Amino acid sequence: MAEEVKVFGVWASPFSRRVEVALKMKGVKYEYIEEDLTNKSPLLLKYNPVHKKIPVLVHNGNPIAESLVIIEYIDETWKHNPILPQHPYDRAFARFWAKFIDEKALPALRNSTWSKGKEREVAIGEASEHLKTLENELGDKKFFGGEDIGLVDIVANVVGFWFGVFQELSGLELLTEEKFPKLSKWIHEYVNHTAIKDNLPPRDKLIARLGAASKKKNMAEEEVKLFGVWVSPFSRRVEIALKMKGVKYEYIEEDLSNKSPLLLKYNPVHKKIPVLLHNGKPIAESVVIIEYIDETWKHNPILPQHPYDRALARFWAKFIDEKCLPALWNSIWSKGKEREVAIGEASEHLKTLENELGDKKFFGGEEIGLVDIVANFIGFWLGALQELLGLELLTEEKFPKICKWIHEYVNHTAIKENLPPKDKLIEALSARFGAASK
């Protein structure tokens, strides 16, 4: 019976690639499963519940985690083409240097490219010392493993390939032929070895990936604060936009019955939430903030690229804010004849949105865009209010396309994790309605 061998990994990860190199050196066929570390699969969490990381090897249903542990398992399970030396002393020696690379060299190399200022100077000094140590250990050998690749060479793949990309991106000149001639010679032999060259990620693709990661890290170092109220769809719009962009931010909950001095300082005109504070500069009004976010952090665009399509998106966002929401709000808050009129107006506006949505998955097309974010009240809050008040305005029978959109919307990754808990929302809205009716 054929063996089941699966690898859960990330194509850009040197740790995943270590495992793939070991399997290919052994000639073991395997199924590769690409993981998204921003949305880890249930299987990854099942097979590596301790660290919740890649790589994970699954062999006949048995999971093994941590790249060094996996490589040794592979070497002991498929004994041909040995990766570790045969003598116990030599094996211990290989494990020592593999551990040195993972626990000393890699953290210093990573910090030398990612950190800044004084911290970076210290990291470069440490990385240089560790590279000198590896240079001395390599000596005149072709590979760390001798005449062929072994455990230490596989583990040193960051030094052999990834670090060159890091240097190119950061402008660092740490590992050069002048400073480390033996390591540089080893790198040339390494990347051209049959077991390695076919198992490296495309350099241009890796540069693009790591460049994007570098930009995200720079974003994380920026001061981004959001003043909001958890129950407010307007606050949540901004949070969705920030999370779609992967921007880290500090959230400050406001009490609108006792507004903070900072809120009044940063939004002296309207004195309302939300307010985004970016490196000390305040921006108010949710739609204005979303456009600012989209223009400041350009990846994962929220607005369309073409000027006409952007104008259309702005038109529909304005339609929702200035026509739909007031009518929907009045249909909920008003009474008697006024409420009947408001329900009629709200129905007309929902019909207009139904027609605009058509057969599209989202207002933004195949992916969520500005109009979808602005329509969050319709997508979630209105349902909670209808449930609370026994209102049947937006139903599947009357608005099938909007209802289908709502289902897609609330289950979209960018949305479902950024919605308030429905029971807590209903409780808050119920208290508000109770206070208003007294």
Image (spheres, rainbow, N blue to C red):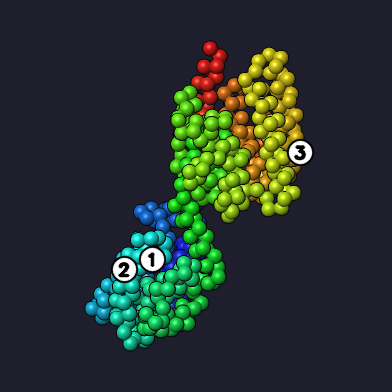
Q: Can residue 312 be seen in this view?
A: yes
Q: Alpha-carbon distance for marks 2 and 1?
A: 9 Å
The image quadrant that residue 21 belongs to is bottom left
Q: Earlier in the sequence, mark 2 or mark 1?
A: 1
Cα–Cα gap, marks 3 and 1:
55 Å
Under mark 3, the amino acid is Asn
Q: In this view, does 118 lie above or below 287?
A: below
- Residue 308 shown left or right of residue 386 in the figure: right
Q: What is the tally of numbered marks visible in this picture?
A: 3
Task: Please give the name of the residue rendered at 31% of the width and 68% of the height, measured from the top-left corner.
Answer: 126
Q: Do the residues labelled 2 and 1 touch (CB within 8 Å)?
A: yes
Element carrying mark 1? helix
> The residue under label 2 is which amino acid type?
Glu
Q: Residue furthest left?
A: 89
Q: What's the residue at 32%, 69% (across, down)?
A: 125
Q: How far apart are marks 3 and 2 (CA)?
A: 63 Å
On residue 112, the disc is 1
